[in-house]
């Protein structure tokens, strides 16, 4: 285990199994239709790459960059958003993939933008982690991997100041490692 990690919450194996289940659920709901699966950079990229491999349906991939966090662990409240669709998304089904649903501000801003500005008729959301206790926006994910308590987690794509994304598991950072 990395020396900055106090506790592992979700092991590599637990993540692998749960991601497969999410992929199966999405495949089932798509029922052979083609979906656009959209990763929110950067946190969701590891989850995203495993998830698309467990979806058994035709998919296209797109990317968007959304951020409400600076270098700290608290949301600034403002959501910066860039969507990079290569193709016209009007009338498409889009599954937005994020690492963690916290206050919900990021995901609801992305969903609004896709619906209202990009004309997406069918938006679904998929997150690996769900911190229900912190929700302020009215949004729930259509697919969610694990509930998580109100602790700051890193690994498997999740960062603190852009570090720890490459850890294969998800864990809690030791308190002394913030601001280091
Ligand atoms: P929301 O807009 O739902 O408050 O924030 C969602 C974003 O906040 C996530 O995509 C993620 O980047 C960040 N975030 C929220 N909680 C955590 C956490 O525990 N660890 C990390 N690394 N990022 C988090
Ligand atoms: Mg994020």
Image: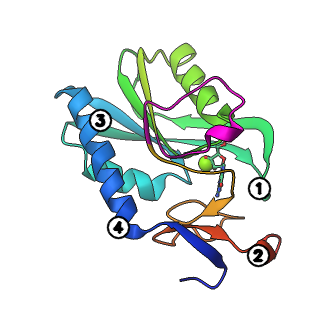
In the image, the segment drawn in magenta is: 127-144
User: Mark 1 packing: few (<14 Cα in 10 Å), some, or many (20+)?
Assistant: some
Left or right: where 13 falls relative to 10: left
User: Mark 3 packing: few (<14 Cα in 10 Å), some, or many (20+)?
Assistant: many
Give the Cα separation between the discs numbered 3 and 4.
20 Å
Q: Nearer the viewer, mark 4 or mark 2?
A: 4
Rendered position, 85 above or below 174: above
Give the Cα separation between the discs numbered 4 and 1.
27 Å
Give the residue displayed 59% in from the left and 26% down from the top.
Answer: 139
Residue 8: give x, y in percent of width and height: 54, 71
Give the Cα separation between the discs numbered 3 and 2.
37 Å
Give the Cα separation between the discs numbered 1 and 3.
31 Å
Task: Look at the numbered disc 3 and say if its residue's Cβ is closer than 8 Å to ligand 1.
Answer: no
Dot 1: element: loop
Task: Look at the numbered disc 1 and say if its residue's Cβ is closer than 8 Å to ligand 1.
Answer: yes
Dot 2: element: helix
Residue 18: give x, y in percent of width and height: 35, 53
Task: Look at the numbered disc 4 and say if its residue's Cβ is closer than 8 Å to ligand 1.
Answer: no
Give the Cα separation between the discs numbered 4 and 2.
26 Å
- For residue 13, the mark is 4
Give the residue displayed 53% in from the left and 83% down from the top.
Answer: 1
Pointer 3 or 2: first along the chain: 3
Left or right: where 159 falls relative to 168: right
Q: Which residue is mark 1?
A: 73
- For residue 26, the mark is 3
Q: Which residue is mark 2?
A: 177
Query: In which quadrant will I find the C terminus?
Result: bottom right
């Amino acid at each position: 285990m990395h020396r900055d990690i106090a506790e592992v919450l979700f092991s590599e194996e637990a993540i692998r199994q749960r991601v497969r289940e999410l992929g199966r659920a999405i495949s089932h709901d798509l029922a052979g239709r083609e979906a656009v699966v959209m990763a929110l950079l950067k946190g969701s990229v590891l989850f995203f790459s495993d998830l698309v491999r467990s979806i058994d349906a035709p998919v296209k991939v797109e990317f968007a960059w959304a951020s409400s966090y600076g270098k700290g662990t608290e949301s600034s409240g403002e959501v910066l958003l860039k969507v990079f669709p290569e193709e016209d998304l009007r009338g498409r089904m889009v599954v937005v993939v994020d690492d963690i649903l916290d206050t919900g501000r990021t995901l609801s801003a992305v969903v609004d933008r896709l619906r209202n500005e990009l004309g997406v008729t069918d938006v679904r959301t998929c997150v690996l982690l769900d911190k229900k206790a912190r929700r302020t926006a009215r949004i729930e994910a259509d697919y969610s991997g694990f509930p998580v308590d109100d602790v700051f987690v890193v690994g498997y794509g999740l960062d603190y100041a852009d570090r720890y994304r490459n850890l294969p598991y998800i864990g809690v950072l030791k308190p002394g490692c913030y601001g280091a």
